[in-house]
Amino acid sequence: DQQVKQNSPSLSVQEGRISILNCDYTNSMFDYFLWYKKYPAEGPTFLISISSIKDKNEDGRFTVFLNKSAKHLSLHIVPSQPGDSAVYFCAATYGQGAQKLVFGQGTRLTINP
Amino acid sequence: SAVISQKPSRDICQRGTSLTIQCQVDSQVTMMFWYRQQPGQSLTLIATANQGSEATYESGFVIDKFPISRPNLTFSTLTVSNLSPEDSSIYLCSVETRTLYEQYFGPGTRLTVT
């Protein structure tokens, strides 16, 4: 049972344009969502997060949108840069204390010059 | 942020043997986590390791196959026992952060079982 789904395994975007990565979830108990970025041979690095009490969180070029009714979140990167080329994982968790992160399958983003 | 190192970075092991992966953190942390990423799949939590107590395993993972040690607040090991080709994966450790929900990840150990 895949509770967090990223249905696009790959995405190609031109440099300078907007990249939109999507994520859907099924567990209504999730109350915190995160995006991680992963380069080859490295561990995932935290990028941005959002609590379920918000619908938008922005940090520089990165914005995460949450639509609770649709159980959908998206990550917008604008403008996209070549260094953004990586695999992006969506993750979700719930409850206080210990954090069991449930990850999606990842989307490989390629930024073309 | 915490700096996490893992050893080995990669290994090729024969079926039936075991591999022990080490995770070292540059600061004291209460909780450490071990994940597995099978080829083309998402990261899946294997277990949570607290210092001074038994690790807590997720559904589908058992201590006999994935024994974990947590001798102090900066170190943990994960052993993958009785290896089969299906164990070929990247194994990652992570630690909690002060923001609770976010985790810092190590670089991972790529295991190939032949």
Image: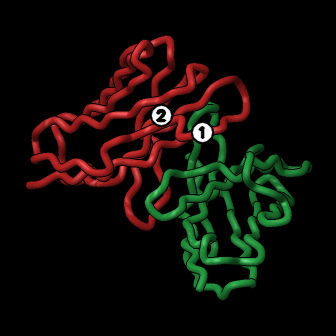
Q: Identify the amino acid type marked 1.
A: Leu
Out of A70 and B98, give the one closest to the viewer: A70
Q: Which mark is residue A34?
A: 2
- Chain A, colour shown: red
Q: Amino acid at mark 2?
A: Leu
The N terminus of chain A lies in quadrant: top right
Indicate the position of residue B66 as horizontal and vertical percent values. 77, 64
Q: In the visual, does A22 lie left or right of B36?
A: left
**Tag count:** 2
Say which residue appears at 33% left-offset and 34% top-offset: A22
Between residue A64 and residue B100, name the one nearer to us: A64
At a point 55% along the width and 46% down the height, the residue shown is B1
Seen from the viewer's position, the closer of residues A60 and A99 is: A99
Could you tell whether B75 is left or right of A93 in the image?
Answer: right
Residue A101's disc number? 1
Q: Chain B appears what colour?
A: green
Q: Is residue A75 above or below residue A30?
A: below
Q: Secondary structure at mark 2?
A: strand
Q: Residue B89 is drawn in which quadrant?
A: bottom right
Q: How is the image coloured?
A: by chain
The residue closer to the viewer here, B58 or A19, is B58
Q: Residue at x 24, y 35 (%)?
A: A20
Residue B65 visible: yes
Q: Which residue is located at x 44 percent, y 48 percent?
A: A105
